[in-house]
Amino acid sequence: MTAHAGKERGDRPWAAFAALAAMLLALALSALVFAPPARSQGDGGARYTGVASCAGSTCHGRMEGDGTVVRQDELMKWQEPSTPGGAHSRAWAVLGNGRSQFIARNLGIGDPAKAQMCLGCHSTAGTARAVQAEDGVGCESCHGPAGGWLASHYAGVGTNADPDREMREKHLANLSAGLKKLEDPVVRAGVCVDCHFGAAGDGQFVTHRIMAAGHPRISFELDLFSSLQAHHQEDADYGWRKFGGANRRTDHVQMWAVGQATAIERSLALFQTRRGTDGMFPEFYFLDCHSCHRRIFDQAKPLRTGIDNPGRNLPEGMPPYNDENLIMLAAAARVASPGLADQLAARTAAFHKAMATDRQSAVQAAAQLAQTVATLKAAFASRSFSGTDAFAMVDAIAARAINDRFTDYSGSQQAVMAVDTLLDAMVSSGRITIGAAAGIRADIDRAYAAVKDPNAYRPTEFQASLGRATGAIGALR
């Protein structure tokens, strides 16, 4: 299963996305890849203007991407039918299909197209914004409420002798007026995880009960999903506006690492709040699905259904915390911040152990672990990553200390998405050729296929496929 699109990611054809699309669409409501936040943090009282304010033919509403500064067909890309790139525009419409109605009946919430439990992520409007819910997840869900910066945004560049500098200064002014700085991985991660992972806001947390009613499990990786949703090209002009240099581009390895840290940071934060419990039970959303969702055998010759995970110090039969992002974070820390890697390992082990004690102990251990995760995120955000780092990250993911922890499908999903992201980062940085990468795709696709269906997940087969892919990548160093 492969994932990255666009010229800057290696010109991979749409057919190459088939396996990834199959997994994501199987997880989504009528091909919906879940929306970024309808109410991202820090909006305050800023004014929303709606999708129509971006749709003029002189702005982002052209039928062809032939603009001189930006493509200008971004709205068409946003509306592209039946592709991951058009999923945000379909976010509200999907609430009217049969599956959504089925979920709503099970939950007793009435019309899902009007229920805050759903609108919090399926529409920019939510229940309190003067924009059309029918627009789904519109431009301002990601880019921020446009009331304060729209006029400056479309005013264009004047006659300054240095237009690149003027363009950069204008972008910085728009950021001050409320435009989201999505080129910053920390900002982008904070925006996206509100719905692609969960938030404290109304309608922005998919609980275990919502999943039991029929909602698909949330699956997300920041750099991969960013590429699927990208409606722009990273050319020289983009480099000047966003980064202040024609040759500057998104650091995809950094984006991936910051995304992993942000996801587990958000998970631990929610776990420590009332979101961590549901009545007398823990909130099962935080736990490893496969630790409970296995067949029950009653036979003379017992058959063990699980595989030991060396990263979890828990008694047999105790459901563990879902550590898919912690596993990836451990690999990233070994490469990018070795001084914190041992602290992360120790606090991860202490957290897993505390889960078998009581909630108070688990919350205290989660707080300690969250401190290390936040420090790691800051370390990732403050440094650049080279092509050599991408190879080292792949090596870390393939190392036995990490590979042996791929015992559930969610952790394995993160691993194969990571290897796919890192391989494309090597291509986009010129470390390896498109042709060389193409020879590795078959094993990556086999690894994706192994995690497509959680009911058919086989850890040993997955580890073998991923091992072949990482070995082949290592040979290209």
Image (cartoon, rainbow, N blue to C red):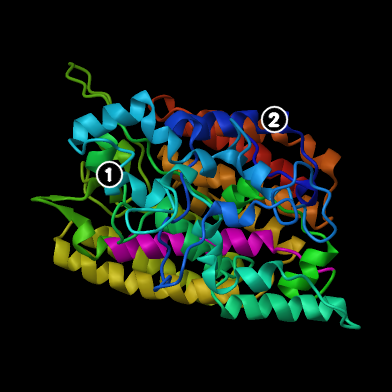
Secondary structure of residue under mark 2: helix
**Seen from this angle, which residue lies furthest right?**
161
Judge from the rendering whether residue 171 lies leftward or rightward of residue 255; answer left or right: right
Q: What stretch is highlighted in magenta?
A: 247-270
Foreground residue among 457 and 231: 231
Judge from the rendering whether residue 274 lies leftward or rightward of residue 82; answer left or right: left
- Which amino acid type is shown beneath numbered disc 1? Ala
- Which amino acid type is shown beneath numbered disc 2? Ala
Q: Residue 261 carries which label?
A: none
Residue at (22% x, 65% y) in the render: 273
Q: Name the residue under label 2.
A: 442
Residue at (45% x, 57% y) in the render: 193
Q: Is residue 267 magenta?
A: yes
Considering only order in the chain, which callout, 2 or 1, is on the residue closer to the N terminus?
1
**How many neighbours does mark 1 have within 10 angstroms: few (below 14), some (14-19), or many (20 or more)?**
some
Judge from the rendering whether residue 357 lies leftward or rightward of residue 420; answer left or right: left
Q: Position of residue 37 (x, y in %)?
A: 44, 56
Foreground residue among 166 and 262: 166
Front tag of 1 and 2: 1
Q: Is residue 282 magenta?
A: no
Instruction: Note whether 299 is above or below 472 in the view shown.
Output: above
Foreground residue among 403 and 246: 246
Q: Position of residue 291 (x, y in %)?
A: 28, 39
Q: Where is residue 232 in the image (x, y as percent from the top left)?
A: 72, 53
Q: Mark 1 points at which residue?
A: 115
Secondary structure of residue under mark 1: loop
CA separation in Å, label 1 and label 2: 43 Å
